[in-house]
């Protein structure tokens, strides 16, 4: 009986893990190797650029950085990333509220007179994937 329960448990676990994917994000266009790169993953229009679903920080090597989000559910996402050049943990802005550190979003989405929209940045992750983002 214990063998049957163990087999059923393994089967259920394998089905659950089959619903998850890995997402690798490659960030290029960094002007130097100072500081870190922060990558935020968002899973809805309501939370985009407000509350990350998951976030990862990466060191910079050869003016590039790569992060991987492991075991995320298949679905729709958007990414926002920035070069935290002074390593203070936030995207610095000038007096007008315009970012003074380089930033970008998935699909290289650009905003008009403001940040990009989730609609322009969203993509679907149905399998293990890689996204390339070039900083502005």
Image (spheres, rainbow, N blue to C red):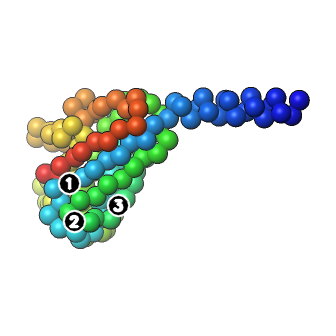
For the residues bearing labels 3 and 2, Cβ distance under 8 angstroms: no
**Residue 119, above or below 88:** above
Question: Mark 2 to mark 1: distance in Å?
Answer: 9 Å
Query: What residue did someone put label 1 on?
Result: 28
Of mark 2 and mark 1, the one earlier in the sequence is: 1
Secondary element under disc 2, as helix, strand or loop, is loop
User: From this viewpoint, is residue 48 visible?
Assistant: no
User: From this viewpoint, is residue 136 visible?
Assistant: yes
| x then y, percent, for residue 69 | 42, 46
Query: What residue did someone put label 3 on?
Result: 58
**Mark 2 crowd level (few <14, some 14–19, many ≥20, 10 Å Cα):** few
Q: Quadrant of residue 11?
A: top right
**Mark 3 crowd level (few <14, some 14–19, many ≥20, 10 Å Cα):** some
Query: What residue did someone put label 2 on?
Result: 62
Question: Mark 1 to mark 3: distance in Å?
Answer: 12 Å
Secondary element under disc 3, as helix, strand or loop, is strand
Disc 3 versus disc 2: nearer the observer:
2
């Amino acid at each position: 009986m214990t063998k049957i329960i163990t087999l059923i448990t393994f089967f259920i676990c394998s089905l659950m893990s089959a619903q998850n994917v890995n997402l690798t994000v490659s960030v290029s266009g960094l002007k130097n190797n100072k500081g870190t790169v922060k990558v935020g993953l968002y899973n809805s229009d309501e939370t985009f650029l407000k509350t990350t679903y998951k976030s990862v920080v990466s060191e910079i090597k050869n003016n590039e950085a790569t992060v991987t989000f492991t075991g995320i559910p298949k679905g729709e996402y958007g990414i926002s990333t920035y070069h935290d050049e002074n390593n203070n943990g936030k995207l610095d802005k000038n007096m007008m509220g315009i970012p003074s550190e380089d930033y970008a979003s998935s699909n290289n989405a650009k905003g008009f007179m403001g940040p990009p929209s989730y609609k322009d940045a969203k993509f679907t992750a149905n399998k293990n994937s890689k996204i390339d983002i070039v900083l502005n």
